[in-house]
Image: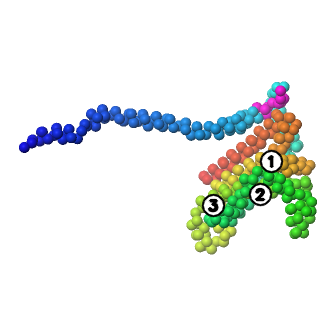
Amino acid sequence: MTSVDEVKPVARRAAGPSPRTAHGPAGAAGPAAGRSVRNRRSGRWWTPWLFLAPALVLFLYFKFIPMASALTMSFQDVQPYLGNRWVGGENYATVLSSDGFREAAWHTLVLAVGQTAGSMLLGLTLALLMEGQGRRISFVRSAAFLPVVVPIAVVAELWRIMYHPTEDGMLNSVLGLVGLGPSGFINDPDTSMGSIMLTGIWRGAPYDMMIFLAGLAGVDRGLYEAAKVDGASRLQRIRHVAVPGLRAVLSILFVLAAIRGLRVFTEVFLLTNGGPDGSTEVVMTVIYKLGLEQNRLGVAAAGAVLLFLATLVLTVSVHLFRRRGNE
């Protein structure tokens, strides 16, 4: 009969070497694994920056460096090939004391307010009409979004044709059907600003519509059903359910639309170039003419810095107002 003492060594040999003898000391595997994990983590921190590098280089070269150059030029009398001369705040004083710049700033403010209110109101209306799922609705949304993707030069030329001031012009023909006389539109100082505002609203509303649609998707549908059961009309459901649920979206869109209105340039430049009689002159067209037509680059840079500061103040003010409302 085999004794117990003889069975134990055989069992140990059958089980193979112990973890301690096979891998060395018990604590040896822990630090090695920790080092490998740390090495992998430390090797990954630069991966996102590697993907962002091309965009960051483009932003640095085409945006941030020109912004720094414009800030420097705003304090100088810029003389290409002759050397710049430091003039301090003289350029800012010239801009702020200019009647033309103040008038252009007023036109910019009016245009920004009108386009912001109009595009947001029309965008919200379109979003409420096209809310839901369905193949036909998706097609209509895509069709409504086309003005955003069409180049602004094409949009301006399209509206220039529509604004033809003769009686057989497209919009004047429509006005004639309802008994209204022909209008000069962009050729009349009394209607040119409203015509450009209408063009901006037509192009900006679809963009606002898509953001409103995304915001409406996050509104609790149960609130609509509860309001409907309580006898609320569709207008009341929009006012008391949809609009409060879109509060964050409204603040974001207000900032985006206001910045878009303050920086308006291309449609004004292509449609009227500030005319007729300066009735549509805005800050961006004044900056363009000062810098590239009159070669007063320092004064133009000062106007650009002031416009940037106005945009920054608007953005920060809306952000602080939103934070105070949330608190």
Q: CA distance from mark 3 to mark 2?
A: 21 Å
Q: Disc 1 to disc 2, how far (Cα)? A: 15 Å
Q: Is residue 50 above or below residue 276?
A: above
**What segment carries the magenta color?**
71-81
Residue type of the residue flagged with mark 3 = Leu
Q: CA distance from mark 1 to mark 3?
A: 32 Å
Residue 202 is tagged as: 2
Residue 109 percent coordinates (x, y): 80, 50
Label 3 packing within 10 angstroms: few (<14), some (14-19), many (20+): many
Marks 3 and 2, the one that precedes in the sequence: 2
Q: Is residue 315 visible?
A: yes
Give the numbered dot on residue 266.
1
Residue pictured at 84% horizontal, 49% vertical: 270
Q: Quadrant of the N terminus?
A: top left
Label 1 sits on what residue type? Thr
Q: Mark 2: few, some, or many residues within 10 Å (few <14, many ≥20)?
A: many
Task: Check disc 1 and report its element: helix, strand or loop.
Answer: helix
Disc with the residue nearer the chain's start (1 vs 3): 3
Across and down, in percent, residue 74 comes to: 79, 34
Q: Which residue is mark 3?
A: 216
The quarter holding residue 139 reads bottom right
The residue at 61%/71% (across/down) is 228
Give coordinates of residue 224: x percent, y percent: 60, 67
Q: Residue at x 43, y 35 (%)?
A: 36
